[in-house]
Amino acid sequence: MHPKKDLLPNYQAFEKYFLSLATFLNVQNSRVMSNSNNTFKDYIDSNKQRFLDELFDLIRIPSISADSQYKDEVRKAAEFLREKILAAGADKADVYETAGHPIVFGEKIVDNSLPTILVYGHYDVQPADPVELWETPPFEPTIRNDKIYARGSCDDKGQAYMHVKAFETMMQTSTLECNVKFILEGEEEIGSNNLEVFIKEYKDMLAADVVLISDTDILSNETPSITTGLRGLSYMEVEVVGPNRDLHSGMYGGAVANPLNVLCDMIASLKDENNRITIPGFYDKVVEYSDEKRAEFAKAPFSLDKYKKALDIKEVDGEKGFSTIERVGIRPSLDVNGIWGGYMGEGAKTVLPSKANAKISMRLVPNQSSDEITEMFTKHFESIAPDTVKVKVSPHHGGEAAVTPIDSTAFKAASEAFHEGWGKYPIPTMEGGSIPIVSLFDKILGLNTILFGFGLKEDAIHSPNESYGLFNFYKGIETIVLFYKHFARLSK
Ligand code: BES
Ligand code: MN
Ligand code: MN
């Protein structure tokens, strides 16, 4: 055996001691007493500023997973979180290598007879572009109107970090009544492919009673909600190739097929006059909801007027026969995410481009299979190409939709946590975004997930000027602590 390996456990023990000491001193510095008379709320309150400072340090690391230039930054964010989990009182926390960006795993086993919560989050973020539309730099967190403005403030650094601070709070106030395992990944925004490999390999290490994730929204700060459904995804890239070189659009225009024109026609034909997707078989497995169920959805408070105003649009759009909430929550969709080709520089250049490209994504609902839809799309897109062009279809990432049960102990605990913390029971909702790993936690580990998110629609995740409310950050920490409390109680 390599001698250094023997030293590793000692080194880790030392490091753990050192980091706990660091936290201890930090806590003393901010003159906080964590004696038993203090409740967890006092602890959060007295450490408010430090919690925020730490989150700011995390946000300042531009951990953009999609861009290989930021590879080292992604790793820095992983290291940062590993240290913080350890400092908060974990038995261990490690950074695991994968074929892509690393995964952080840490745990605190209080007692094997207690229930175990597996906390999942992601520390990678979306690219910040278009950077010129940000009011303040994307990786320099700034507070305006009681919100933290920065890339990742809500999705998902702010939300994931609430769990680390909730854990610290329970450790410091001796109120942790569940075992905790943290799994934080750096590839959520690019499809979580290596996380799938990881959870297959480390099934035993990840054994738990429930997965807890804060990476979704609530309806509003007045109307708390719990997400019970997420859509799946198939993400495609297509290329349409025409003549073997760019041509003079006067000499050839009207006589040779223009790949950009053809691509636009092909994309336009993917939906009919009712905004239904025309790919044969696309709806075959889509679950149709009963009128009763739909009436239930319709009860969720929603103002179409406010929705339109917030987006500055005159009208909404979507599949005929469904409400806006349904279009996002229970119906699939198809969108062009980007399209390019030809001349895109300043001024005008008269050119008939040789090729055209587009990125097209489909959001899927329960029972639709991402692989099947990817295949259907590929076949269909190839079949509708006219003889004037060649087409190439390549899939990017995908993932399955997820529905989480609302009759589980964990869901009850989540409801009770909101009730105690917010004075209201949360409304179950279905959301349109995707977290690919949720269905795999169920399939591979046999675990249900609670989507315990605290974001708001106006937080503008993935957009310029992403934000996260200070209220949501602190209230989220409190509500997470309450979840542990109720989950422990209801699991007895
Ligand atoms: N946190 C979001 C997903 C989300 C946001 C769900 C709000 C529900 C409400 C997540 O980080 C995300 O952006 N996921 C990607 C998935 C993908 C890249 C595979 C998405 O939905 O586009
Ligand atoms: Mn996210
Ligand atoms: Mn995201």
Image: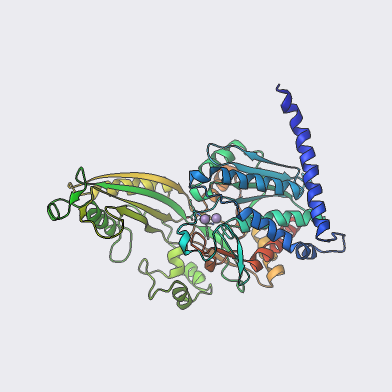
Can you see residue 213? Answer: no
Query: Which image quarter: residue 317?
Result: bottom left
Tell which of 19 and 90 is nearer to you: 19
Residue farthest front in this picture: 347
Q: As displayed, is residue 109 above or below residue 27? A: above
Q: Does 184 appear above or below 311? A: above
In-image side of 253 versus 57 (left or right): left
Quadrant assignment for the N terminus: top right
Nearest to the observer: residue 39 or residue 58: 58
Q: Position of residue 154 (x, y in %)?
A: 58, 60
Q: Position of residue 455 (x, y in %)?
A: 58, 64
Q: 208 left or right of 267? A: right
Answer with the quarter of the image where residue 451 lies: bottom right
Residue appearing at x 54%, y 66% in the figure = 459
Q: Residue at x 21, y 53 (%)?
A: 351
**Quarter of the rendering occupied by the C terminus:** bottom right
The residue lying at 76 percent from left, 61 percent from top is: 47
Residue placed farthest to the top in the image? 1
Q: Identify which residue, 57 or 472, lies in the foreground.
A: 57
Is 101 left, or right, of 278 in this rendering?
right
Q: Whole-percent x and y of residue 445?
A: 60, 43
Residue at image coords 20%, 42%: 244
The spot of residue 444 in percent (x, y) is 56, 42
